[in-house]
Image (spheres, rainbow, N blue to C red):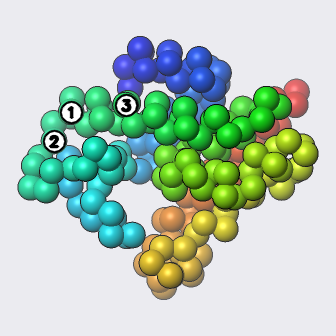
């Protein structure tokens, strides 16, 4: 991720959260230069980019993917964070951006996360674990062959909890 984009992200979420987000999205999403259909049947390329719609049959370059990833991460961060209350901690911001990038910013509102943060509810970090289903399959069940989705929700929850504890120090 370019320093310019890291800087923009840091303005949105703070330096600590920006560093976590910048390293976790590629790790959680992986990077593929040839478009593919994800477990939900969505055409995807690079590190989880679904819009602008990937070109089927095209092989994207490392530079093209970096540019797409950066643009989409900032867009999702802006959309996801606008729903969070002012008392959101670093962990909440990390959760909102990581989950918003994967699930879409609308799910941040649907999950009740903003309300839980406003109430300073300790269960806020677990609010998005319920989004563990793909095409009607419960991804917490390993035999459904989508356990990575559930593992991601747990990683997001754990990062949220860990960075909120650091905020409390």
Whether residue 32 appears in this view of the structure is no
Between circles 2 and 3, the one closer to the viewer is 3
What residue lies at 60% left-to-right and 66% top-to-bottom? 131
Between circles 3 and 1, the one closer to the viewer is 3
Q: Alpha-carbon distance for marks 3 and 1?
A: 11 Å
* N-term-proximal mark, 2 vs 3: 2
- Residue 64 marker: 1
Tag 3, which secondary structure? helix
What residue lies at 13% left-to-right and 56% top-to-bottom? 56
Query: Looking at this rendering, what residue extends furthest in the bottom direction?
Result: 143
Crowd tier of the residue under label 2, counting other residues whose Cα lies within 10 Å: few below 14, some 14–19, many 20 or above: some
> Is 168 placed left or right of 86 in the picture?
right
Q: Position of residue 156 (x, y in %)?
A: 63, 50
**Label 2 with label 3: CB-CB less than 8 Å:** no
Q: Quadrant of the C terminus?
A: top right
Q: 95 or 144, which lies in front? A: 95
What residue lies at 55% left-to-right and 38% top-to-bottom? 79
Tag 1, which secondary structure? helix
Q: Quadrant of the N terminus?
A: top left
Crowd tier of the residue under label 3, counting other residues whose Cα lies within 10 Å: few below 14, some 14–19, many 20 or above: few
Q: 111 or 4, which lies in front? A: 111
Residue tagged 2: 60
Residue tagged 3: 71
Whether residue 122 appears in this view of the structure is yes
**Label 1 with label 2: CB-CB less than 8 Å:** yes
Q: Alpha-carbon distance for marks 1 and 2?
A: 6 Å
- Residue 144 marker: none
Q: Position of residue 133 (x, y in %)?
A: 54, 73
> Is 67 placed left or right of 17 in the picture?
left
> Is 94 placed left or right of 5 in the picture?
right
**Label 3 with label 1: CB-CB less than 8 Å:** no
């Amino acid at each position: 991720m370019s320093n310019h984009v890291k800087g923009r992200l840091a303005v949105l979420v703070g330096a600590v959260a920006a560093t976590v987000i910048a390293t976790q999205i590629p790790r959680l999403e992986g990077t593929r230069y040839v478009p593919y259909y994800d477990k939900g049947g969505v055409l995807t390329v690079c590190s989880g980019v679904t819009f602008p719609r990937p070109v089927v049959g095209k092989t994207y370059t490392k530079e093209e993917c970096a540019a797409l990833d950066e643009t989409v991460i900032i867009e999702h961060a802006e959309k996801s964070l606008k729903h969070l209350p002012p008392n959101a901690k670093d962990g909440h911001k990390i959760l909102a951006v990581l989950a918003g990038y994967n699930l879409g910013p609308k799910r941040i509102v649907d999950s009740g996360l903003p309300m839980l943060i406003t109430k300073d509810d300790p269960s806020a970090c677990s609010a998005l674990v319920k989004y563990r289903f793909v095409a009607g399959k419960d991804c917490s069940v390993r035999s459904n062959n989508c356990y990575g989705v559930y593992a991601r929700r747990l990683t997001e929850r754990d990062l949220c909890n860990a960075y909120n504890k650091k905020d409390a120090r």
